[in-house]
Amino acid sequence: MKAGIVGLPNVGKSTLFNCLSNAKAQSANFPFCTIEPNIGVVNVPDPRLEKLEELVNPERVLPATVEIVDIAGLVKGASKGEGLGNQFLANIRECNAIIHVLRCFDNDNIVHVDGNVNPIRDKETIDIELQLKDLETVEKRLEKVNRTAKAGLKEAVLEQSLLNQIRDLLLQGKSARTVVAQNQDEADLLEAFQLITTKPVLYVCNVDESAAVNGNQYVEQVRELVKSENAEVIVLAVATEADITELETYEERQMFLEDMGLEEPGVSKLIRAAYKLLDLQTYFTAGVKEVRAWTIHVGDTAPKAAGVIHTDFEKGFIRAEVIAYDDYVTFGSEAKVKEAGKLRVEGKEYIVKDGDVMHFRFNV
């Protein structure tokens, strides 16, 4: 599961990517410095993992991870191939969610591709390019399905109706994510269309250091604009976050954050938000050899969760022994949880909850 960072050139995408992954994507003051997408596998900050480590004292600790892709700056005309547009759009299509970076700071030394700072216009520029690409996809698909729908095929009629609904919205300048599937058939079709604007989106307002805590007028404009999208907005001083990652020790980083009035680096919030955006959650395994966070989708059953460790665990699943994270912390160890009668045995139908501490019994 991948989240792609998008935005106009020079809004802070590659600097943000560097903060997230500590990889060194080229960050330069001109468009298209990131021609090939840079991919970083980023640890998901999780205080629960630290608490389990403290209680279990294992040989090693492995956090959950999320994949972040730094995609080159998009410009007007990208849907028609302008400025390496086709390649960029293909890279976005391969991602499961979009982190949209908007420039919300003034700085005469950093050129803006459109001459001045206006996050509302910038957002619309990107939205229009993505919507135009989706419109092209939808119209091509309609050409094919219109023929079979004439014959009265039920599946074709359903697809035609849904495509026309999406087409109307795109022509109104709305994204396909505003379409609400009425049933499972429509949900499956929406997924099969692989439209860029159905992907969930998270907006990152890149501000200067003075606005890192409370935002600024640009941030308020963005929040107002995206209200109808039910999308999250995160405020981040990306250049300052880059400074924080350069500090050698945890203590130095904490002092820097305290001086700014922040409890934790903004990128930590962003990583957790991206994880949530991808509809992911975590369960834990905890033993003296290893305490580990495992990534699953929200709604996954116990066998599916077991399969993340090894396919044999899913094939031969017998049962799961489950401890709620809060119970593990309250009683302090697996043995004490058992004594208190708080360890549960769950079967194949069990839907795993975020934070469950689990052992699996299987037989292949």
Image (cartoon, rainbow, N blue to C red):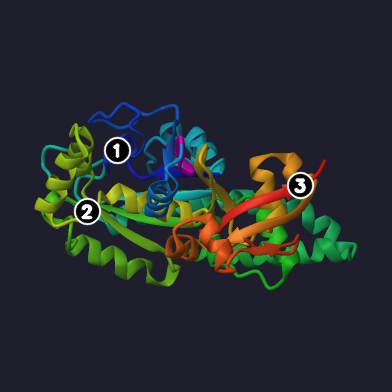
Which residue occupies the foreground of this view, 59 or 42?
A: 59
Residue in the picture at 17% in, 41% down = 251
Q: Residues under labels 3 and 2: Cα distance?
A: 53 Å
CB within 8 Å, label 3 to label 2? no
Q: Quadrant of the C terminus?
A: top right
Residue for badge 2: 104
**Residue at the limit of the structure toward the front, as seen here:** 339
Residue 201: % across, % down: 45, 56
Q: Residues under labels 2 and 1: Cα distance?
A: 18 Å
Dot placed on the residue nearer the N-terminal end, 2 or 1: 1
Q: Is residue 152 above or below residue 357?
A: below
CB within 8 Å, label 2 to label 1? no
Residue 126 visible from this viewpoint: no
Residue mark closest to the camera, 3 vs 2: 3
Which SS class for mark 1?
Answer: helix
Label annotation for residue 19? 1
Looking at the rendering, the stretch of residues picked out in magenta corresponds to 59-70
Dot placed on the residue nearer the N-terminal end, 3 or 1: 1
Residue 146: % across, % down: 78, 58
Residue in the picture at 23% in, 44% down = 238
